[in-house]
Image (cartoon, rainbow, N blue to C red):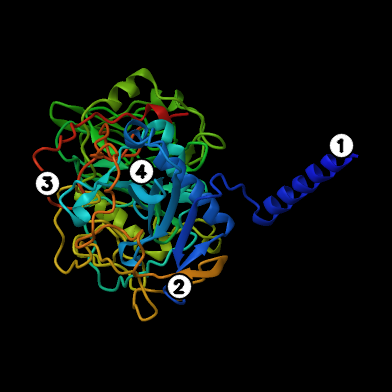
Amino acid sequence: MGMKRFTFILSFLLFIGITSHAQNGVYDNYPTATIFIVDAQSGQEVLAQSDTAILFKNALIDLVTNTILVQKQYKHVIGHNAYVITQTDPSNGNEYQIQENTKVFGATVPVYTFIYNVDQNKLYFNNPHGAGGDQNLEAQWISQNNMANLNRCQQFGWFNNLSAPPDNTQQQVDDTTPVDTAVTANVPPPALPTYDQPECPQDGYLWQPGYWAYSVDARGYYWVPGVWVAPPSEGLLWTPAYWSFNGFGYYYHSGYWGTSVGYYGGIYYGYGYGGHGYYGGEWQGGRYRYNTAVVRVSVSVRNTYVNNTVIVNQPGRNSSSFNGRGGVIAKPSPQELQVERQPRVQQTPDQIRNQRAARNDKNQFASPANGNKPMNIAAPRAPEKAVTATPNQRPNANSAGNNNGNQRQGYNSPNAKPGAGNTNTVNQNTRPGANNPNTVNQNPGSNTATSRPAYNNTNARTGTGNANQNSGVSIPKGTGNGTPSSNNGHGGTYQNQPYGSKKAPANKPQPKPQEKNDKQDKK
């Protein structure tokens, strides 16, 4: 009788567990952790229980607990620990605060606080010993074995995006700051289109093949036309951008200038870029010579030669636009690995302007309506500087002075100062309420009606005027200083630099530059 009773109870509990899992559809790795989001209708914080919210919660806790800072300084904090995730003021963009709390003699005490910005795909540590306000936030270095959690955070972090799309009318195209340089997409980029290369307009110009870029704002791929551009200096060659599949998403690798052509995923861009190296020309005696067997030049370009052997040695064309499973399977050669460690020069103003113009043109975005065929595939030159953005298109989130709240100050330039008119560089301590113009009528998903006060929240993000919340318990002081690396997102990302334009106090160690290392992401 006792065995039958035990079997019945076990079967009942198993049934309840299966039913509960089926209702949510996903497994909650941290059932005691809570995630609160801002309700678009009321502006109040409500408990989020949708499948995507749980997936995001799992990914964010995994990301934070696997950072070097937490592993070294907070791993052995005693007590009953719990996590609370809250969506911050939408004026900061799509952003979440995560706080670990512990109980000491019955009192709840904060252990640490991090901020994750979905728009930037960056994690910040809220250093309680910093200069105060947003200067407390220090970008964290993400190790290679933690990159999957970072990518999952961005993948699921859009479930309650309340950042209002700012007006892009009459916005001049910026040509100084690269855009969409470190992004991850959930779907693969479309196949590469076929096109005829325009003739090189003048001596000294080099070919930049067209490529697919991804706009996080518009959540779609857009085609950046192939153009002839002047190199930053004599002797430099262009390594094209490419996409790679890392098992959880598709990651973008920016193109760059260097003394040699590096690894670009084995992508066949054509016109000299056959997957490895470049065969469309070479530097000789301070002048660039064009191999007219593979590139087209105008009659005014006379420094040419013909080498047909590179055509014979090239494999057949592959229209795949990304490296990895389902795309091109190619690993970097020893020479390409060596180039990875050499100094790089970023895009020129012409190249940046070319990409920004494409980003602001709805006809350049891939869609079923146009068969993933952009209107402008290639051009002899980049657009002129006077080009302005198309009305009603989302603006670039990185331009100086753009008061759209979707980007933290100094995102692409750690020493950048707020642009004129940028009023969102200082943290506001109030959450949006019913009369807050920052709220948008957007369905936040499956949330419970249970709400809690939005303004007197003890888990509110630390800012100017807030009491220091990370005090009252003997916990190792975290400076947030991790091993710095290049800011391209491969194998360790995001230099640990104070948030904002001010320099860190003198007693904080400054990060040392480190050569970029992409080898880990190569398939």
Of residues 150 and 192, the one nearer the viewer is 150
What residue is drawn where x is 48% and y is 72%?
442
Could you tell me if the residues under marks 4 and 2 are in contact, i.e. CB atoms within 8 Å?
no
Q: Which mark is residue 507?
A: none
Residue where numbered disc 1 is placed: 3
Residue where numbered disc 3 is placed: 503
Which of label 1 and label 4 is nearer to you?
Answer: 1
What residue is drawn where x is 52% and y is 56%?
53
Which of label 3 and label 4 is nearer to you?
Answer: 3
Of residues 337 and 165, the one nearer the viewer is 165
Could you tell me if the residues under marks 1 and 4 are in contact, i.e. CB atoms within 8 Å?
no
Which of label 1 and label 2 is nearer to you?
Answer: 1
Amino acid type indicated by mark 3: Lys
Amino acid type indicated by mark 4: Pro
Q: Residues within 10 Å of mark 2 (few under 14, many from 20)?
A: many
Residue where numbered disc 2 is placed: 40
Where disc 2 sits, the SS reads loop
Amino acid type indicated by mark 1: Met
Residue 58 appears in view: yes
Q: Which mark is residue 209?
A: 4
Amino acid type indicated by mark 2: Ala
